[in-house]
Amino acid sequence: MGSNRTVGFFDGLKYRGGGPMIAWMLHRITGIGILVFVSLHVIASFFMQQTGSDIATSMNIIYESWIFQILMAFFVIFHALNGLRVAIQDLWPQSQMYQREALWLEWLVIAPIFGLTAVFLVQRGLGG
Amino acid sequence: MNTRTVQPGFSLEYSMWIFTRLSGLGMIALATIGMAGAFLMGARTQLDLATIMRWTFFPNPNHVVNSNIPDVTLGWATAFWQIMQMLIVILGVTHGFNGLRVVVEDYTGQNAWRPFFRGLIFLLWIFVLIVAIYVILAS
């Protein structure tokens, strides 16, 4: 927490952490993305409910677009399943010996769930 | 490698570490219950992703109004689902803003900005929580 790091951003990118590092980065990015979306969505739904304002309506139109939905589906599915893996491995530390195997299993679970969702969303988005 | 001194006992970091894991698992459980509730109430056709996400994470009568359950207020406008919504909102918003605090403190480090960001995140947390609970109670 809050160490006095001397590693710059671009040096950090050269660090070859492999799969676990990618999962860690994606977990942060998706977490911040979900937080921003949920906070804006809560505030927009407040204005929608209380005043029916145009700004809230235009925000809701953005969320309903299929491109946004594909992105948010990935964010939610990845964050939930990666978080499940992290929670299981943290609460049962012996399993961290098999972190890479757990990551492969995680991606194997994510691939069909997100893949099917994305296929249907693209079909709907392009087919109307 | 410096040796690290480990503080025994209870601290904010430790309790939030535990909370993040438990609330994450709890939200997965709540989402499963929300989705199961929607299917039990007859939502089986014409599902789109937004509808599933709404049932899963925030089963509120106003929120699921576009879905094809004939009368959304019948099954969902009960104290049980209001409590479920509040639980998922409290767990989710707290989990999220604590995560933001961890990320921000990872990049700002230990300096004078830390209490400033901590206070700002605390205020945003309280604000979003109050607005979300107001939306639940007013719908």
Image: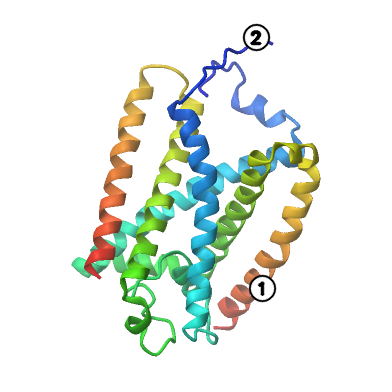
Which residue bears the numbered disc 1?
A119
Mark 2 surroundings: few (<14), some (14-19) or many (≥20) residues within 10 A: few
Q: Position of residue A123 (x, y in %)?
A: 63, 78
Residue that appears at 44% across and 49% down: A35
> Is residue A83 left or right of A34 when viewed as pictured?
right
Check disc 1 and give the amino acid type.
Val
Against B39, is A35 above or below? above
In space, the residues marked 1 and 2 are separated at their CA atoms by: 50 Å
Residue that appears at 37% across and 52% down: B90
Report the quarter where the N terminus of chain B lies.
top right
Res A34 visible = yes
**Residue A78 quadrant:** bottom right
Task: Determine which of the numbered discs, if any, sits on residue B2 in the image.
Answer: 2
Snapshot colouring: rainbow
Residue that appears at 43% across and 52% down: B92
Q: Nearer the viewer, mark 1 or mark 2?
A: 2
